[in-house]
Image: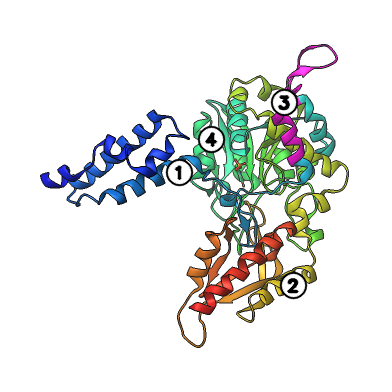
Amino acid sequence: MNSEFRRLPGVDKILSEERIKQLEDTYPHELLVSVIRQHLEHERLAIVAGNPCPPLDKIVDSIFAEIGKLENFSLRRVINATGVLLHTNLGRAPLSPETVAAMSSAAQGYSNIEFNLDSGTRGSRQTHIEPMLCQLTGAEAGLVVNNNASAILLVLSALAKRKEVIVSRGEAIEIGDSFRIPDVMRQSGAKLVEVGTTNCTYITDYEQAITDRTAALMRVHTSNFKITGFTHSVSLQELVTLGRRHDLPVVDDLGSGCFLDTTAFGLDPEPMVQQSVTAGAGLVCFSGDKLVGGPQAGIIVGEKALIDKLKRHPLARAVRIDKIRLAGLAATLRHYLKGEAQSKIPVWAMLSTPLEDIEQRAGKWANALKGMAQVIDGKSMIGGGSLPESTLPTKLVAIKGEHKGKNRNLAPTLAQKLRSADIPIIGRVSDDVLLLDPRSILPEEDEILLRELRNLTAILKHS
Ligand SMILES: *Cc1c(COP(=O)(O)O)cnc(C)c1O
């Protein structure tokens, strides 16, 4: 082991290597030394663990790569060919050009984000968006925060700290990525009182759980699953009626939050924000980047007295939205106000793309693969915790892994190859077939995809 340590080069030795020397033009000397030291320490530990010391050029390779990592952004644009329109791992909603322009403009210079141009005095960032939210939803007041998880945290902290909130057992859910409604409620200091059973909850269950410690009744959209069969749940209307009798507000966590009628797009009905407001929910909260189709945000609308309470709460500052996303959300909401959401907001445009258009695009891509791919029927999903069971018919490009009768499954290799493209393309592999869904691909990305598919044919030919 000692002899392995002795073979480990010193910092100066590495600095004198030609490839590292060149980097002195771009990076401060201290940075190079720091990366080299860190890497040598890493090698030392590897030797302690019983590994041999790598040759000098391997060590230089690794250090060169480490420095390269500082240069490259690891967060990159990708093409979503999964057919899941609101894919949380792929950044949820793509934004309209108007939204992007508004965000870019807000980012570049100063803005009147908290400045009243009439009076020349301090203003509130919420004034830029609140009237739009009220107009769209029919609510008295509104507030935008960082995301829906923070909206729930703020609502429960402001309304129910050290008090109780009643929620149906069937709605005490986990959304994914360890985001659990009961955990968030605990963070807020509110005590969760679960009523009913997993599949059945009745209004009497809520009623019997009301005590003088109760602060609110809560409904949570069971975003990513559906209980079917023998079930019963309480309508928002019933909850509101019960709440009014006991002077308790109803908080409605809609999750996705939708302004348009999804049945018009051939989908299952998704509760709309306007309906919750009309039904009399005291507060309704939802995400900005799910079916709303805007940037990440948490939107809360409802009764003015309750919203005012939220605005005054100290947590409001901790979860506030930044100027760039506020500008973006306003631009997205404007599409709804102007009645152009379906054509301008990418997720809604994708939802409403006619099957013939999708088939035509899929056909073009399958052709580029010169008979190595087929167009088959498939289903696109909405994702983002909305419409868990509802799918849209689509046409998929199916690339078979096996080739020339040889039964070698290439699908994972092809999928990996597409992921390593300049603009990575994310498809899905199912039953040894690589599937690409045009529905979740922006029309302006078609050319990029076509180019990468042509590269793919080279691999298929030589396999
Ligand atoms: C997605 C979701 C959330 C979390 O929203 P984020 O904007 O991701 O913080 C909360 N509640 C429900 C019901 C959801 O579907």
The image shows residue 324, relative to residue 19, as above or below, that is above
Q: Nearer the viewer, residue 417 or 328?
A: 417
Element type where label 3 sits in the image: loop
Element type where label 4 sits in the image: helix
The residue to which callout 3 is attached is: 109
The residue to which callout 2 is attached is: 359
Q: CA distance from mark 3 to mark 1?
A: 30 Å
Q: Amino acid at mark 3?
A: Gly
The residue to which callout 4 is attached is: 185
Q: Amino acid at mark 4?
A: Met
Of badges 3 and 2, the one in the foreground is: 3
Query: Colour scheme in the image?
Result: rainbow
The magenta stretch spans which residues? 100-126
The residue to which callout 1 is attached is: 69
Q: CA distance from mark 2 to mark 4?
A: 46 Å
- Say whether disc 2 or disc 4 marks the residue closer to the N-terminus: 4
Of badges 2 and 4, the one in the foreground is: 2
Q: CA distance from mark 3 to mark 2?
A: 44 Å
- Say whether disc 4 or disc 1 marks the residue closer to the N-terminus: 1
